Amino acid sequence: MRPAWRVADVRAAEEALMARLPEGTLMQRAAAGLARRCALILEQVYGAHVTLLIGAGNNGGDALYAGAILARRGAAVTAVVLDPAKVHREGLTALTQAGGRAQDQPPRTIDLVVDGIVGIGAKGGLRSGAATTLHRTLERRGRHGQRPTMVAVDVPSGVDVDTGDVPGKAVRADVTVTFGCLKPAHVVGPAAPLAGEVELVDIGLRPWLRADPAVLVPDRADIAQALPKHRPTDEKYTRGVVGIATGSMTYPGAAIMSTAGALAGPTGMVRYAGTAREYVVQAHPSVIATDRITDAGRVQAWVVGSGLGTDETAATAVRTVLATSLPVVLDADALNLLVGGTMADLMRGRSAPMVLTPHDREFARLAGEEPGNDRVGAAQKLAAHTNAVVLLKGDRTIVATPSGTAYANPTGSAALATGGTGDVLAGLLGSLLAGGLRPEVAAVTAAYLHGLAGREAARHGPVTAPDVADALRPVIEHLTR
Ligand SMILES: NC(=O)C1=CN([C@@H]2O[C@H](COP(=O)(O)OP(=O)(O)OC[C@H]3O[C@@H](n4cnc5c(N)ncnc54)[C@H](OP(=O)(O)O)[C@@H]3O)[C@@H](O)[C@H]2O)[C@@H](O)CC1
Ligand SMILES: Nc1ncnc2c1ncn2[C@@H]1O[C@H](COP(=O)(O)OP(=O)(O)O)[C@@H](O)[C@H]1O
Ligand SMILES: [K+]
């Protein structure tokens, strides 16, 4: 897992580390890492045109020292200083001594822009002066007529570092070079895609950071490790059986799609219980189907919700599943049925895990307010309130546990923004739960695989939910190979 820490934690660690080092050491380490990456992007530093956008704080200081390194290697470096009264003096001196210059407008030719406007000291979106300078800079072209490459220092300027919100104008970077640790803005919310490729430069901060990061980002190895391995002694029941209680005569597609997601998971068998049984068996002949949950036979986890509707039959299905002592995924209509609070007793009485999988509108109905700017905080709050793991869907899907651990999924794909993909996700998640994964591990794993499947499906053209379900098997195969 890759951890990300909030600004206050970074500042505390920085203070502890700085107390043991000569002044300026951390900025020198940061600037060296930044200059190294810029040089790699430029390939040939000598003769390259580099523009530094310099704000009022140490973020600008990092950029100025990196600019000095590049200038010594023969780059033509220009610092555009936004507020000369507040510039990092020593950094500016270092730049000019290395042959760089400072001016108040961007030069004509720019191959590479270093965004040192603002870092972890940011408040709100880019201020108008900075936004205007950025706009002018982006109109310039490089020596070969190309668009300049944008390298953000620490974070793209204008993002909310702790929440990943983008409250106004912000830099869109090709590469972000960050120092010491990742911050939430690199991995959650609308800020995350603005960071481009994120490079983490080690400045020695890690041992001084508190043990519990703000967010964890799973990587490939975490997911490969989490997936159950087939043993030679396995038979279908030892691999787990997942029960799917979704869909209806009105929405049989939801039943088919959630079953498709479940079939791609690790369980040995999928049981379906509901009024869409004939459709499900037609689409998936290996599924054992009944009309009612109580007739379904033994399962190790239930998925309930999507396409059920909200009538009395649907409410009975949700109540029946909640009354079991099994792990449960509550999706779509099941979430809407929780809103009135009539199932609160059943939820409170449960010791088996529950995973809620809302999109933003379902979240708003359930929590009484929109997820808002702080999606991690919002998911954590709902998880604590419901004592369930919450998977808040989106571009960077968040998984939060009742005890406050939060994960951000890195594999999102806008191709998933199409009807029925959420049903596939819920089915897969149910299969992982029935396969014995802890609820937050199942949720993180499902979101990760689902995102990869969305990307894989998108390689072949416009994506529909069945394409995502079909892509899950090769994606899982590839990951566990
Ligand atoms: N922590 C570490 O371990 C290390 C940190 N390092 C580096 O230091 C950076 C943090 O530096 P920092 O604390 O000086 O703050 P920083 O982000 O430069 O902002 C300062 C000023 O910007 C302004 N401003 C605010 N919002 C704005 C907006 N929306 N749009 C425009 N301007 C805005 C505001 O100035 P004001 O005009 O209000 O006085 C504010 O005071 C960090 O990101 C990293 O790069 C590394 O050197 C190595 C180790
Ligand atoms: N812009 C996007 N980028 C990445 N993933 C997205 C985006 N929009 C939606 N998704 C994903 O697509 C799925 C949609 O689920 P949901 O809204 O429940 O759809 P449905 O109810 O039609 O199945 C979720 O997994 C969500 O995270
Ligand atoms: K920046």
Image (cartoon, grey):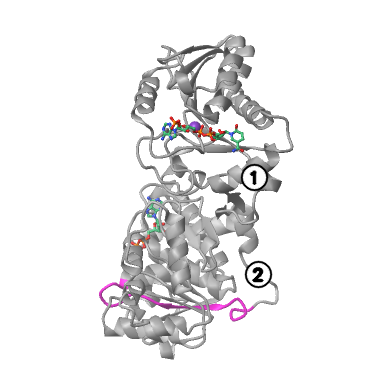
Residue 145 is situated, as x and y percent measured from the top left of the image, at 42, 15
Per the image, label 2 sits on a secondary structure element best described as: loop
Residue 383 is situated, as x and y percent measured from the top left of the image, at 46, 68
- Does any atom of ligand 1 lie closer than 8 Å to the CB of label 1? yes
Amino acid marked by disc 2: His
Predominant secondary structure in magenta? loop
Residue 264 vertical placement versus 78 (above, below): below
Per the image, label 1 sits on a secondary structure element best described as: helix
Please tell me how crowded label 1 is: few (under 14), some (14-19), or many (20+) other residues with Cα within 10 Å. Answer: some
Pick the quarter of the image with the N terminus. bottom right
Q: Nearer the viewer, residue 248 or 189?
A: 189
Residue 16 is situated, as x and y percent measured from the top left of the image, at 68, 43
Q: Nearer the viewer, mark 2 or mark 1?
A: 1
Q: Nearer the viewer, residue 232 or 262?
A: 262
Residue at which label 1 appears:
13
Whole-angstrom CA distance, mark 2 to mark 1, is 43 Å
Magenta stretch in the rendered image: 235-252
Residue at which label 2 appears:
230
Numbered tag placed on residue 440 in the rendering: none
Residue 434 vertical placement versus 32 (above, below): below
Residue 167 located left or right of residue 40: left
Tell me, yes or no, whether the highlighted magenta stretch contains residue 413. Answer: no
Q: Residue at x 36, y 56 (%)?
A: 464
Amino acid marked by disc 1: Ala
Q: Residue at x 58, y 73 (%)?
A: 435
Residue 305 located left or right of residue 196: left
Q: Nearer the viewer, residue 410 or 235?
A: 410
Residue 263 seen from this side: no
Tell me, yes or no, whether the highlighted magenta stretch contains residue 244. Answer: yes
